[in-house]
Amino acid sequence: MISPEEYKILKSFAERIPDNDPGAHNNLAVVYYNKGLYEEAIAELEKALSIDPNFLLARNNLEIILKKSGKLEDKVKELAHRIEAEPFDEIKTLELADTYRKLNRYSQAIIFYRKVLDFNPGSYEAHFGLGLTLKSLGKYDDALEEIKKSLEIKISPEGYRVLGEIYFNKGAVDLAIKNFQESLLLEPNSPETHFFLGFAYGEKGKHKEGREEIRKAIELNPALAQFEPNLPIEIKEHRTHLDFLKEQLGVPKAAVNEFQAHKNLGLTYRNKGLFAEAKREFDECLKLNKNDVDLFVYLGEISIFLGKLDDAASYFNEGLKLDPYQPKCANGLGLVFLKKNDYKEAQDWFEKSLAWDKSLLSALNNLAVVQILQNNFDDAINNFIKAKNMGNEEARYNLGIYYLKKGDYETILKLFNGEGIDDIFMRGVVFSELGRDEEAIASFQKIIAHSPNYSGAYYNLGFLLMKIGRFEEGLSYIRKGMEIEPNYERDKYRLSIAPELYEFGLFYHLPKFEEKLVEEVEEIFPKLEVPRPEDFILEAEAQLKFGNLEKALEMVDAALKINPEMVEAIILKGKILLQSNNPEDAINLLNSYTQKHPTDVESQLALAGFLKSLGRLKDAREKYYHLLELQNDNPQYLKEIAELSFLLDEIDEASITYHKLYSMDDRDIAANLGLLKVSLKKKELEKAKLYVDFLEKEGVDSFEFNLYGGIYWLEKNERERARGYLKRAIELEPSKPLPYYHLGLLLVNEGKFDEACSNWKKALLLSPDEELSNKISYCLRITMEMMEFLKKAV
């Protein structure tokens, strides 16, 4: 108990605290708390928060006191009793859900948020609170859905801020940045959002921009610059304001447990396919604890993905020393031997795994793969079907490959009748085999729109386009497929290691006859191999595919050491530097090479592509002009120049170039589409009609034509035709904001204000650029004001 004298001294000290200093009120609250004066501590923290509502440290201190003192529990009991005794009260139920969330009693919070939504599906607060709860549980996809629903009901800066945090947790840092920026458009003076944006920029290597955002945050809230003077309630609960921000962004706190923190972060990286980063974290775990069998399982798994089979075998064997009947280790060893084409040893390990755990579906699928490779078809198909019926996706895919080889297309269409990516892919392949080219093309285009790294879609689409005479377009898709997966095989079988790693595609490739022959000969006549630069390039490409940038760079440098002027190595090194957030080094490297080799087309093209990807559109255009000097009137370079001019809003320049393309081939789709865009930009509707008519007659069904065709018919006030085009554009590219924006304009003209606003809200959620975002926000604001005015008028 505190003495009366000490209490008087504290009160005297409290009277001398400046009214506008939130940090001082926070620190006095800590003193009160440590003396057992909870009521006084709460009062001081509430003063701090009234001065600075964004003072995260004070807010967390307040929650700790409320929890420790039992006041939050009292509040829960009181609210729960009143809710049971009275008819449904939305406000009280929301308050109870919020309180459960603050107490980390997430399951109860979810129940009451859902109860509110059962009565009122349009509750912004319930969707937002449920999203925060799911975010705290790490259910990021579900959390995204709820926060987006809340934003459809009411656009708010906190909604975009939380979206940014969730995207950051998922590793989608670019989307996180975009949403933090959207939040700041609505609330430019939010110090917390500037702070989050600063961290996100830092994660992307944009340190200058990051420092600038943190400087703005501190200007808006000087308390952010004073982490140390502002005291936390308990050091083990949280240490600094920075720890709060890390906690908000999903970074584990070291104070919890250093081993567990590294393990959790490693699992996060593993589940995102960042295997090199995951290995680094798991290696840290091994320094702290070598008796965790799961750790050896994870290290073995990611070693297989990294192509280090011997390392994988060592990890799985270490796991079996700790647990001699660990089924996942046995399954992992089976995969190692299968990858080494030792079918008998692989089958033995898969059978052991299933003997130790009959429910391990990954081992059942892998056993079936071995059986089918040994022509034991009956057992293989039975095991695939059994694993598929119990939910194993790899087994379902492998059944599709088996039936594809047999030409049993009817069974494949029955097996893959959903809307998942593999379903669409398998149907696309079947349509292609049956000569239903348009349906196949639409299937592969749909996959690319939703999963840009699905290599099979690019290859198959490319082959189809070439088959129907669209050679240039087809080749471009095949090149893209080769960038993702250089040695693509359609008829490969999927191996199963863990359900959460399915999307990263662990496959078994049949060894080629020549490779087998070489292996057999080398067993008898081993020879000393001298590595060639091409060998290092192949290894670098493999390392780059797995995200191991340092190793990839090491391999490229080894190739350049042998042949410093090897253009393939120069270009690949540039790509690696770009992905490593070193764009200037990449550009300087290519600039230096192209200056020495001014007539080398391949390096000039690569440099132009780099500059375009970095948004340096004028510099990119200059490179294409230089390429035109090397290859006069090359249509591809002219198209790039025209497109870049259009993007730079240099419409006259774009028009000249598109007209040149048109004069070379008046049936060229890109030229006609480009001239349509130019005509619309210049409001020359009569000219635009010529190109619309041609493209319609040719049956062009691209996203770009449907978008600009819709804009054309909207300008002509042909609303139904415009609606059809814009809706088709949305079907083809549902993640692009422009069609929603123009559809909103159409709906406003029809007096359908609610539908218009709904489309504009969707457009905003799709992270448009700044100019379009401002247009959409303006349209929303004006339309909502008009709706309010009309309501008052009525």
Image (spheres, rainbow, N blue to C red):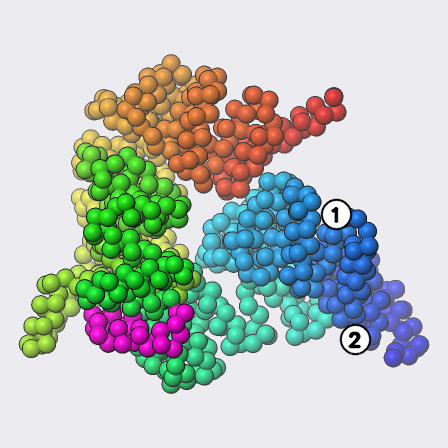
Q: Which residues are magenta?
A: 332-360
Q: Which residue is mark 1?
A: 90
Q: Main secondary structure of the magenta part?
A: helix
Q: Which residue is mark 2?
A: 34
Question: What is the C-alpha distance between the residues marked 2 and 1?
Answer: 38 Å
Residue in the picture at 18% in, 56% down: 566
Badge 2 or badge 1: first in the primary sequence: 2
Residue in the picture at 24% in, 62% down: 378
Q: Please name the amino acid that badge 1 sits on.
A: Glu
View extreme (top): residue:
686
Between marks 2 and 1 in the image, the one whose residue lies nearer the viewer: 1
Tag 2 near tag 1, CB within 8 Å = no
At label 1, counting other C-alpha atoms closer than 10 Å, the crowd grade (few under 14, some 14-19, many 20 or more) is some
Q: Quadrant of residue 519?
A: bottom left
* Image-based side of 329 in relation to 533, left or right: right
* Image-based side of 456 in relation to 649, left or right: left
The answer to whether residue 109 shows anywhere in this view is yes
Q: Nearer the viewer, residue 347 or 145?
A: 347
Residue 437 sits above or below residue 266 on the image: above
